[in-house]
Image: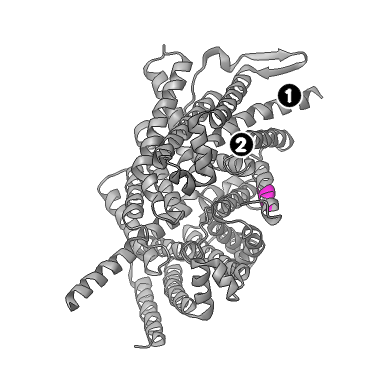
Amino acid sequence: MTPRAFSAGLLILGGALAAWSAMRLDPGSLYLLSEVVVIMILAQMWNLLAGYAGQISLGHQLFVGLGGYALFLAANNTGVPIWIWLALAPVLAGALAIPLGMVVFHLKHAYFAVGMWVAAEIVAALVLKWSWTGGSAGLILRPGGESMTSNPERVIFFGLAFGLVALVVALRAFLASDTGLALLGMRDNPQAAEASGVNVRRMHLLVFVISAMGCAAAGAAYYVNALYISPSDAFQMNWLIAMMFVTVIGGLGTLTGPILGTVLFIAIREVMTNAGYSGGTYWIVIGALAVVVLLVAPRGLWPAIQDLTDYTKRKAFR
Amino acid sequence: MTALFELLLQGVTLGGLYGVIGAGLALTFGVLRVVNLSHGELITIGAFIAVGVTALAPTVPVLAVLVLACALCAALGGLLQVAFVERAMHFRDPMVPMLVTFGIAVILRNLLVETAGADLRGLNVGGLAQASLQLGPVIIGALPVVTLGIAVVVFAGLAAVIRHTRFGREVRALSDRPDIAALMGIRVARVHVKVAALAAGLAALAGVLLAMRASVSPYSGVSYLLIAFEVVVLGGLGSTRGAFAAGVLLGVTQVLSAWWDSNAGLLYVHLVFFSILVLRAMTGRLS
């Protein structure tokens, strides 16, 4: 099968599965599944920066909140249908990410991590302070000033799930393209890449803006489902903790890793909650899992599984 | 005029505390080259050890509680270094130890929530909290002055240890050229453990001082970590004297901005930090 046929197949299959689930499942399951897909998208986007561009951000909760707030403010203050704003919110967040990206890419490694974190704190503090953003009370979703008449979870879930499949297909194609290869070369050896004619700064900015837009899209969709947004929720550190743990456990710098990591992350949470364990105990388990994975297989579970199957395959052929 | 002077003085005393918050992180960042994301949790654990000991045995003097909290936290820091961080440092990728300390931070924070509850707690220091000193027309709380005094002593002591002792020489050698230091027979892993323990002890000291001044919750570690980061980055990599100066700058900024705009929180502190960080990076004065 050619890569193009594989991509087309994946898109059709993913779209059909997303449509079927969106129509058939009950609202409770759809809400949970939407959260799963949101975390998968966020982790893919954090991973694009950390795993493929080698820059660890501690401030990606910024883009989740920006996407949500861009959508709420635009939808509440205009009569334009919310679905159009859902498509435009990531563009808005992406536009804001360009100047930020041009500034923070002067910073490297730990300085970049801290710079992003402080940027997120500054924006969260401003949103908390300003009255036109609703302040600490937050905003209720009232498109055009009227309350929502129907629950959006079916359409939102379809959009999110199809968006995730399209994102993975697009990222596969991107990483196989010349630009994607340049990105991988830049991660592995920035000096050599620059010497071979890769524009490192432009490449970083491109990846940074894509990453911001993806997080903003997921954030906007998540908060439409929630119908309510507040600064302490939208800009919370837990978004970042989820992105980091999911990627690190699943596999940094792989496309399957964040998917696998999210499945584990949510499955463990649901099992432990049903068994009556507290939220604190759950986080201890997840933290311990991340530490163990990092020390035993620092590239994450998915690459470790691949190594293992490669090994058994080689054994079988011998 | 007196009011402004009082504000400045408040800023300097707060800044001394910020310096102590950052001192431990400056050490691990400068010597181990590890971005220790669990530093904030070590601060809250130090505070909670002090609160717990005072609750169990109210007769124990504050100084003994302080020493105990620092010692226990130092032991914890050394243990974490041996058990996890040192192993993570064997992978050549600097991302791995940073992510490991992030996992440790989440574990420690939630262990603290599970054992001590999520409530805010403070440390009762008796009359010291209300006492104030009068210097001519200027009135200032006794506790902030004591805190500043402790901060100055700690920074002077730290500088003396780094400059004059055998351990200090090893630390300087390791932070300059780790490979050559190892060739010269310095037992690298052992120095790493000592530095991690010292940093954790300093974190506990900061935690106890914070609990005396205000209250501490298991979730406040994250905001202390950010302040510590700002102090370390502004002060310069691994520079303890710079950490003190950076702490004072941030403390004065916070007090002045609170006077100017009372519900701003740390907004202006973050803005000042971010501007300096970016300015330095753009002019190429950031490693």
Mark 2 residue element: helix
Same chain for marks 2 and 1? yes
Mark 1 residue element: helix
In which chain is the residue bearing label 1? B
Asked whether, in this view, residue B251 is left or right of residue B96, the answer is right
Residue A110 or A99: which is nearer the viewer?
A: A110
| Residue A211 visible (yes or no) | yes
* Identity, as a three-letter code, of the amino acid under mark 2: Ala
What residue is shown at x 56% (from left), y 36% (from top)?
B22
- Expressed as whole percent of the image width and height from the top left, the position of residue B248 reads 66, 33
For label 2, the residue is: B243
For label 1, the residue is: B6
Residue A136 or B99: which is nearer the viewer?
A: B99
What residue is shown at x 55% (from left), y 67% (from top)?
A190
Quadrant the N terminus of chain A occupies: bottom left
Quadrant the C terminus of chain A occupies: bottom left
Give the mark toward the camera: 2 or 1: 2
Q: Is residue A297 above or below residue B190?
A: below
Residue B90 or A67: which is nearer the viewer?
A: B90
Asked whether, in this view, residue B75 is left or right of residue B142, the answer is left
Q: Start and end of the magenta stretch?
A: B274-278
* Identity, as a three-letter code, of the amino acid under mark 1: Glu
| Residue B219 visible (yes or no) | no
Residue B119: which quarter of the image? top left
Q: CA distance from mark 2 to mark 1?
A: 23 Å
- Expressed as whole percent of the image width and height from the top left, the position of residue B245 reads 66, 34
- Expressed as whole percent of the image width and height from the top left, the position of residue A94 reads 60, 66
What residue is shown at x 42% (from left), y 86% (from top)?
A4
Tell me if mark 2 has few (under 14), some (14-19) or many (20+) residues whose alpha carbon lies within 10 angstroms of its own. Answer: many
- Expressed as whole percent of the image width and height from the top left, the position of residue A184 reads 49, 71
Looking at the rendered structure, which numbered label has been put on residue B230?
Answer: none
